[in-house]
Every structure is written in C-alpha cells, then in structure tokens.
Image (cartoon, grey):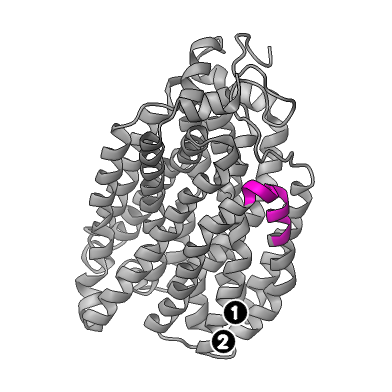
Amino acid sequence: MTDSTVSTDATSTATLRKAIAASAIGNATEWYDYGVYAATTTYLTQAFFPGHLGTIGTMLGFAVSFVLRPLGGFVWGPIGDRLGRKHVLALTILLISLATALIGVLPTHASIGIWAPILLIALRVVQGFSTGGEYGGAATFMAEYAPADKRGRYGSFLEFGTMAGFASGTAIVLLMNLGLSESQMQEWGWRIPFLIALPLGLAGLYLRSQLDDPPLYTDVEKKVADPGGITGQLRQTLVHYWKPILIMFGMVVALNIANYTLLAYQPQYLKGTIGLSEDTASVVVLIGQVVMMLLIPVFGMWSDSTGRKPMWRVSLVGLFVFALPMYWLMGQGFGWAIVGFVVLGVLYIPQLATISATFPAMFPTHVRYAGFAISYNLSTAAFGGTAPLVNDAVVDQTGWNLFPAVYMMAACVVGGIALSFLRETAGCSIAGTKTPGAEPVEDAVETSRVGA
C-alpha cells in the first residue's frame, strides 16, 4: 500500500479543503484570543490590576493560561488517540471560544475587588487547559489528511490560521481604538473583541462536526490492540516514545520563545522602550503579522522540496545572528521598528510554517496526538507562555532593553541542539504504527501492538 493510496485516494479534494478549514479556524480562534489579550494589555491592566502589580499582573494573567496546558495535553492527547480526533477537537474549540467570550463580560476590579482578577485568571486557566488539546489535535488532524508529498503545503494553512487569528485580534483592537475615545475603550470598548470569539468558535465547531476522523487514524484504530484504556495509552506514549518527546521539547523552546516574544510581548515592549503609543505599537506588530501571514504558505510549500531540517536550521541561525541588531534597530524610532520587527518575523516563519508538517511526523499514528500534545504543551508552558512575563520583568528591573534579543538567541541554541537529533520526514508516509522516516513503509498498518 503506497502513501498516495492511503492519503490521496482516501481523501477527496473537497474533504481535504474542509479539513484545512476546520483545523485552521480552530487555531485562529485560539490565537485570536492571544492577539486580543496582547493588544488590550493597557485596558486589562486598568480593569483588573489597577494596583502595584500593574502590567506584571496582566502578563501573569497571560502566562497562567499556560500552566494548565500540559495537563490539557496529558488529558486530551491520549483521549484523542483512543477515542478519535474529531470529538476532542469539537469540545476544545467550544471551551476556548466560550472562555474568551466570558472575559468580555467580567466585572472589573472597581466593581467586585479582588474577585475580578481571580475570575480573569480562572478563565485563562480554562482556556489554557483546552488549548492543551486544541493545537496538537488540529496539527495532527491536518497532517493525517494531507498527502505526504504536500504535507508542508497543506499543513502551513494551520499556521496561516494562527497568524490570521493573531492579526485579526490586533486589527480589531486597533480599529476600536480609532473609532472610540480613550474613555469609551476603558469603560466598555475593550470587551467587544473578546465577545467576537464566540461566533468564531461556533463556526469552527460546525465545520469540525461535518468531518470524520482521518482515514490514517481510523485504519490504525481498528487494528491496534487496546493498551489499557486512556492511562495505558499515556503510559505507552511516555515509555516508548520519550526520545521524540524530548527532541520536540527542545525545538519548541526555540519556537515559542521567539513566538511569544515577537507576537505577544512586542506591543508592550515598543510602548515601554521607544515610547510608541498604543495605536502605533499595534501598527508595527500588525504590519509584521500580515507579512508573516502571506509568507507562511510559501515556506510551507518550499519545505516539501527542501526538507524541514534545512528550513529550521536557516531560521535558528538567522534569528541568532540578527536578534541583537534588529532589537537595537527597533529602538531607533517608528519606521526602524517596523523594519526590525519584519526582518525578525520573516526569519521566524520557516519554523512556524512547518510545525504541522514536522511535529506530527515525529510519532506513529497510534500515539501521535498524545506525543505531540504532551511535548508541545510542556515546553510551551515552561518557556513560551512565560516569555512575555520574563522579558517584561527583566527589562523593568534592569532597564536592559536588549534582553528579549539575548533570550531569543539562547533559545535558538537550545533549538539547534534538539534539531540535530531530528529525523527528516519530508515526503515520508506518516501512516501506520511505525515511526515515520525510520524505514520505508510498505504496508500502512501493523496489526500488532507496538512497543509491547
């Protein structure tokens, strides 16, 4: 059985397009929340953390959502491998969009005191727990529907959704700022972007309800022995696939420190270091996000021919070399801030564009969801979600405005070490219960229990 038989014949073009849309809109909803949260930092601080904590409290609210992501990965991942991708993804997108929308109706600190930030953090925890199953599941879902020789091309649309969601959140807040007075934004305008997450989530839920689980998954599901329920599934993943989990963990350190520094922390950085206003800082970030979004499909498609490792290598080396000079350049004024941010964003894209092609291919089908979700979310919680908080705290305490660049450089070193252990899987089948790229796959499915 060839890969084209497994992937192309079993999946019509129409179904593939639906799978892309269903995966991308869920990811867009997740990242829309982060975009809105980052763009409304000033208003959230005034509404929920008016005391001495200030911006640090708001950044803590951002970081705390990541505390529950690993738990979400440990719970949702094995469930997705045992019970199916579709049902888990339907539930996670609903929880994410609902938690985001509820932030838009929370009473402020002035109304209910300490309960306001507590409720905000509680909703961020729900969002983080749900995201622990959303991202790994969506990437797995996309990768398993895509043909092997076009996995980079189709998988990149998941990250297109990421950037579209983030950019949309930034753009909507910017439009609100332009259309409303400062007092109106402080009183009620900041709530509207959060409320928009609910219809986005419902649209994603509808799209996902129209699809079945990928054929690659259903073929294996029928033939692999039960490892002992959800806990057995988790144990099998951790015991037999610890090596790809560790490799991915290191790569995600580089990926997400760059991601959350450039996308989530940057508006606050630009306001604090070179004195840009709320609107002009958002314009800098929005321009960079749009450029990145347009390039994502190009780099994803390119990775199908060049391989994933060369793309990552160029990105890591490029960020390491240019982080310091570009952050120095951003401190020289508005126009230079745009140039510096766009350069770093373009250098980061080869990583972002190939996530859905690289990471799911590190695991065989029967542990793919759990392996991805556990590794990705552990690393993201430890290093990605905390990046804005770490950057803000160090810059605030030391006045060293170039620290975010140095932090990014250190992350690139970690990612480069992990990358050296990655097996190239561009063009390889990810069907069956063998680790992709380990050896040619003649038969897509083994009937025996792997790892026994």
Query: Which residue is depicted at the point 66% across and 15% down?
Result: 450
Q: Nearer the viewer, residue 375 or 114?
A: 375
Image vertical order of residue 356 relative to residue 5, above or below? below
What amino acid is labelled 1 in the image?
Gly
Residue 383: quarter of image = bottom right
Q: Is residue 412 left or right of residue 188?
A: right
- SS at mark 1? helix
Residue picked out by circle 2: 336
- Across the whole image, how many numbered discs are drawn on residues? 2
In the displayed structure image, the side of residue 65 where residue 365 appears, left or right: right
* Residue 258 or residue 396, whichever sits in front: 258
- Closer-to-camera residue (11/38): 11
Residue type of the residue flagged with mark 2: Trp
Asked if the residue at tag 1 contacts the one at tag 2, i.e. Cβ–Cβ closer than 8 Å, the answer is: yes
| Left or right of residue 234: residue 309 | right
Residue pointed to by mark 1: 340
Q: Quadrant of residue 150?
A: top right
- Above or below residue 180? Residue 125 is above
Q: Is 346 contained in the magenta span?
A: no
Which percent across, then down, holds residue 287?
Answer: 45, 75
**Magenta-highlighted residues:** 303-314
Per the picture, the main secondary structure of the magenta-coloured stretch is: helix
Q: Identify the residue shown where x is 26% and y is 74%.
A: 176
**Image height of 89 relative to 317, above or below:** above
In the displayed structure, 299 sits above or below 211; it is: below
Outermost residue, bottom direction? 333
**Residue 238 % position (x, y):** 64, 27
Q: Which quadrant of the figure contains the C terminus?
A: top right
